[in-house]
Image: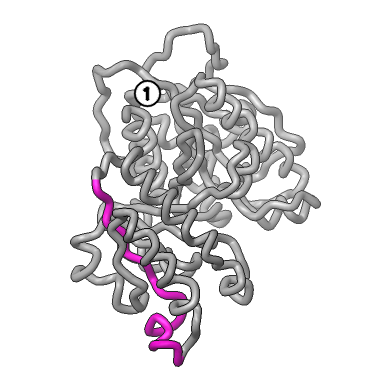
Amino acid sequence: MNSKARKVSTNTIQRIAVTPGEPAGIGPDIVIQLAQQEQEVELVVVASPDLLNQRAEQLQLPLTLSDYNPDSAAMPSPAGHLVVSPVDLIDTAVAGKLTSKNSSYVLQTLDTAISLCQQQQVAAMVTAPLHKGIINDAGIPFSGHTEYLSAKCGVELPVMMLCNPSFRVALVTTHLPLKDVSNAITPELLEKTLLILHQDLKEKFKISEPKILVCGLNPHAGENGHMGSEEIEIITPVLEKLRKTGISITGPLPADTLFTDKYLSCHDAVLAMYHDQGLPVLKYAGFGESINLTLGLPIIRTSVDHGTALDLAGTGKADNNSLIAALDLAIELAKH
C-alpha cells in the first residue's frame, strides 16, 4: 500500500460519493486503504457493507462502517471509518474471480452515486475501476463509465479527459475499435468536443484563456494529404473556424512530436483523436498519479487511471495513489 498523507481542511465540509467498481477487483481494496487516513470530506461509499467488511478482514485493515444519513451534518471521515450507502451484492464476491452475476450490482452502485450527485446530496463522485467485459458478458451493453454517465445524465456528448501533474489529454473518440475511428470523427463531433474542452478548462480549472493542442489523426498529421485526408478535409477547417471565435488552438500536429516540452509547456491541454493516441503517453508520464475526468456533465466525476488488477485483489499490494489523486481533484473542483 502506498498512501500520501493529507491534511484536514477547515473549509465547509463536503460529501463525496465513492463507488468501488468491480467487487472482484482492487476497487474495494483501494477504497479501504483510503479509509485508513482521515479525510477532509465525508466519504459516502456506495457499496455492499458485507463486501467491504470481508475485504477489510482479508487485508487485515481496521474498518468501521456506518449507514449514510442525508439529514445529518457532513463530518470529515476519521481514520478507519467509512459511511456507506448500502447496495446488496447479487452473488458472493471473491477477490480475483469475476462473475457476471454481480454486473447489475456494479451498475446499481453507479446509479445510486449519480442520483446522490443529481440531488446535490454529494458534491462529486469518484469511481474505482470496473470490468467492462464482464458486464457485457451479463448481456448488458456497456462501453464504459464515460458513456454510461452521459446517458444517465441526459448528456449528448461527454468528453473523456485524463490529467496528471504534467499535462492533460482529452479525447475526440473513446472506446471504439481503431477501424471505426476515422468515420467517427466528423466536423460536428470535433467542434462540439473542442467547445466542451475549452468551456470546462475555463469553468472547472479556472483557466481564463485556455490554450489547446490538437493531434492529427494520421502519421505526420497526414503529410499534406499523402498519408490521409482527414486533416485537410475535417480537422483543419474546424480548427480555423474556432480560432475565429477567439479560442487558442494549435494544430493539427503530428502526435509523435506533439507530446514534447516544446508544446506541452505552453499549452493547457491536448486533444487526441482516439484513445490509444494520447493516453499511453500520459500514463507513461504519470501512471498511478493520473486522473480520469468526465467533461460536459452536470455533475463532477473523477476516476482512477487503471483497471481492476484482479491478480492484486485481496493481496494488500494495490497502490491507491491514483484514487487519492482522483479524490483530491474532485474536492478541488467541487470547491470551484
- Residue sitting at x 37%, y 75%: 255
Q: Give coordinates of residue 15: x percent, y percent.
A: 43, 22
Q: Would residue 45 be seen by someone viewing this image from the given angle?
A: yes
Q: Nearer the viewer, residue 227 or 94?
A: 227
Q: Residue at x 73, y 40 (%)?
A: 104
> Where does the N terminus fall, quadrant-wise?
top left
User: Is residue 1 in sight in this rendering?
Assistant: no
The image shows residue 166, relative to residue 56, as above or below, that is below
The image shows residue 64 at horizontal and vertical percentages of 49, 20
Give the residue at x 42% y 25%.
80
Instruction: Spot the residue most to the bottom.
Output: 226
Part of the protein shown in magenta:
209-226
Relative height, residue 81 to residue 196 (above, below): above
Mark 1 crowdedness (10 Å alpha carbons): few <14, some 14-19, many ≥20: many
Eyeballing the image, is 328 above or below 118?
below
Residue identifier under label 1: 41
Q: Secondary structure at mark 1?
A: loop
* Percent x, y of residue 252: 36, 73
Residue located 50% across and 21% down the image: 120
Residue 166 appears left or right of 88: left
Q: Is residue 55 magenta?
A: no
Give the amino acid type for the residue marked by disc 1 in the picture: Val
Seen from the viewer's position, the closer of residues 59 and 327 is 327
Rendered location of residue 153, percent (x, y)? 60, 36
Using the rendered view, name the quadrant where residue 199 is placed: top left
Q: Quadrant of the C terminus?
A: top left
